[in-house]
Every structure is written in structure tokens, then in C-alpha cells.
Image (tube, helix red, strand yellow):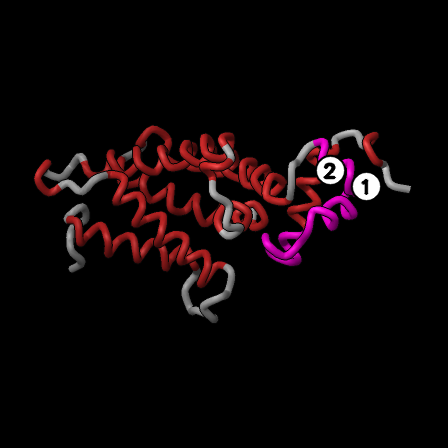
Amino acid sequence: MKRGYHHGNLRQALVEAALALIAAQGPQGFTLSEAAKAADVTPAAVYRHFAGRDDLLAEVARQGFDIFAALLEYAWNDGRPSALAAFEATGRAYLAFARKYPGHYQAMFESGLQPARHPDLAAISARAQTTLDRAAAGLTEALPPHRRPPARMISAHIWAMSHGVVELFLRGNGGSQPWPPEDLLETGVGIYLRGLGLLPPDR
């Protein structure tokens, strides 16, 4: 017998069910009815909390961004012990999050959600972006103003590089590599920062 409306914490139970389904089938590979079945409730009960599957995915993504933003802020640590160390730590935090929370990561970045349509999701994703922007801004303060790219551009480049490493190498989509994903990202970021003049050239 389905639990219907009497489930203790149905909203979170549906989030957990969605995470399990995402792990098995991807963020676009399940229906709201399947989530209801996995949570052991009737499909009608789901609509007390979510207007549809995208609404459920948005909540999974929102919770993911909440964790993600907190990890980035902890890694950045107000730019300590140095702007460079804090910047590099945020990159490692990105990979650590993707490894530990793959279901949330897929809901955040691979579900096709438009954050602008979900105000709570948009707000928390902006918090993560702000931390990356602040880390980039702290790093570029060492450059003369006329040679200083916009912090948002630098953070976008590093975000794209981090996402590429996750997709291709952390999750095995690019085949086997002799280097850990963390080493690939660190090397790529080093090359990028040397190109900006923020690191001395290799000897």
C-alpha cells in the first residue's frame, strides 16, 4: 500500500529517490511517477510538493549548489594563505564535489535546467559563481590594470576547464588517462595562469 500524503518527509524522500534514479539513468532518464514509486508514495502525493519533474530536479540541483557553494567558500578561505593557494583550492573543491556528489552534479549541470526559471536555484548558483569571481579577482590584483582581464572571464575559463576534466576524465568519458583528474586540472590551470603572467614560466 502506498503511503500517499502521510509520508513523514515526502519532499526530501523524493529528492533522495531522484538522486538514486539520476545515478542509474541520468538526469533526463526518469519520470515523476518513477520517483514516486521509488519513494513508495502515490504519484498524486508528489504534486503536493513539486509541480513536475523539472521542479523536482531543480530542488535536487538547489541542494547540490548549496553544498557546492559552501565547499567553494571553505576552499577559498577569504583568499588565505595566499590568493594563488586559495584559487587553486577552489579548483580542487570543484573536482571533490563532482566525485562525492555525482547525482547533484548531474542535476546541476547536465539536466538542461534554466536557473532563471527557479528563483531559489538561481540565487544559490549565483552564490557559487560569486566565490569563483572573488577568487579570480584576488588573483589578478597582482596584474597592472591595463593587463587585467575581467574576473568573471577568468572564473568562467576555470569553471569550463574544471567541468571538462570532470566530464572527460573524472567520469571516464574520455578514456583512461595515466594522470589523476586533479593533476590534469592543476596542470591546465598552471598553463593558463602562466599565459596571463600570474605565474613565472617553467624553467
Residue 42 is labelled as 1
* Residue 198 left/right relative to 31: left
What is the residue that sits farthest to the right in this orientation? 1
- Quadrant housing the C terminus: bottom left
The residue tagged with tag 1: helix, strand or loop? loop
Q: State the extent of the magenta-drawn residues as a range.
A: 21-48
Left or right: residue 19 compared with residue 110: right
| Residue highlighted by disc 2 | 46
What is the crowding at mark 2: few (fewer than 14 residues within 10 Å), some, or many (at least 20)?
many
Q: Secondary structure at mark 2?
A: helix
Between 118 and 141, which is closer to the camera in this rendering?
118
Is the C-beta separation of discs 1 and 2 under 8 Å? yes
Which residue shows up at 35% across the image and 52% down it? 160
Identity of the residue drawn at 78% across and 38% down = 44
x%, y% of residue 95?
Answer: 45, 49
Is 7 left, or right, of 145 in this rendering? right
Q: Percent position (x, y) of residue 148?
A: 15, 40
Decide: is 77 above or below 61.
Answer: above
